[in-house]
Amino acid sequence: MTLARPLLIAVFALAVWAPLAGASANPNNYDCGGHIEAGQPQPGDDSTQVQYVFACGGPITGYQIQPQISDTGFSTDVSVFDQQKNPVTTDSFTCNGDFPGWGFNCIGKYTGTTYANIVGTFSIDGKLCDEPRVDPLLTVVYATADAKGVVTQAISGPYDLGRPRGCPKSAQGGKTRIPSDSSLAGGETTKKATAKKKATKKKATKKTKKHAAAAK
């Protein structure tokens, strides 16, 4: 099948995503971000529902959600809500793709002037908080056409929507599919190396004191 089950309808989350940085005028480098959390159970469907919420600092005409765990379905109709949780009636998306699958594509309209929240759902097998926890990537597109019908398309992302909110801490906590900026720059590696060096030095100091005490 190529169309998701229509009973998977998005329910607006209490939590919204707000931008941490200013909007970018370049549609190939948008400021987008969001999160995932537990979705509402669906009648007649035993799959685990995952709700995604994201916003961007510019207009888009489509996006892709790509979990690393196979999805078993997704909402075909996706709504947009402003920061006050009111529906943005001019904006919406329609999604399609294969399921079970490894992602789905959505097309529609997002004005992108107020960081309104795009809210949709997809489903997975297993419990939401079981490891490995689902951690979907988001890619957005923006297509325009001139008077002659020539289409220009921009692609921005991927953005990591992260592991589910509301789950207990685990050994994998804080580990996402896309490394943090500090990790890419070597910051986290440097911090770990420094901490290891200090621990080794502390251990050597204790050993020296122990030997000194034994020699007295």
Image (tube, rainbow, N blue to C red):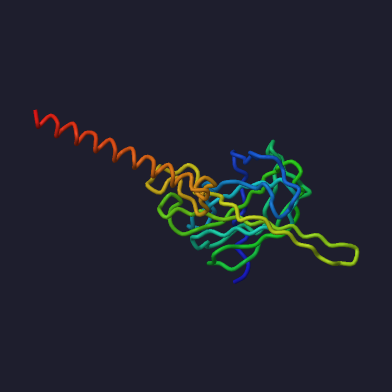
Query: Residue at (70%, 42%) from the top-left corner?
Result: 115
Q: Is residue 41 above or below residue 114?
A: below
Query: Residue at (50%, 63%) from the top-left corner?
Result: 70
Q: Is residue 139 visible?
A: yes
Name the residue furthest right.
147
What count of labels does the image hold? 0
Answer left or right for 208 relative to 161: left
Quarter in which the N terminus is drawn: bottom right
Quarter in which the C terminus is drawn: top left
- Along the line of sight, the residue nearer the viewer: 10 or 110: 110
Q: Is residue 194 above or below residue 60?
A: above
Query: Residue at (53%, 52%) from the top-left corner?
Result: 50
Residue 42 in the image: state x and y as whole percent. 54, 53
- Along the line of sight, the residue nearer the viewer: 212 or 108: 212
Residue 132 in the image: state x and y as whole percent. 42, 55
Query: Residue at (43%, 45%) from the top-left corner?
Result: 173
- Along the line of sight, the residue nearer the viewer: 42 or 38: 38
**Quarter-of-image position of residue 215:** top left
Name the residue furthest bottom.
1
Q: Is residue 40 visible?
A: no
Answer left or right for 59 relative to 14: right
Residue 170 in the image: state x and y as whole percent. 38, 45
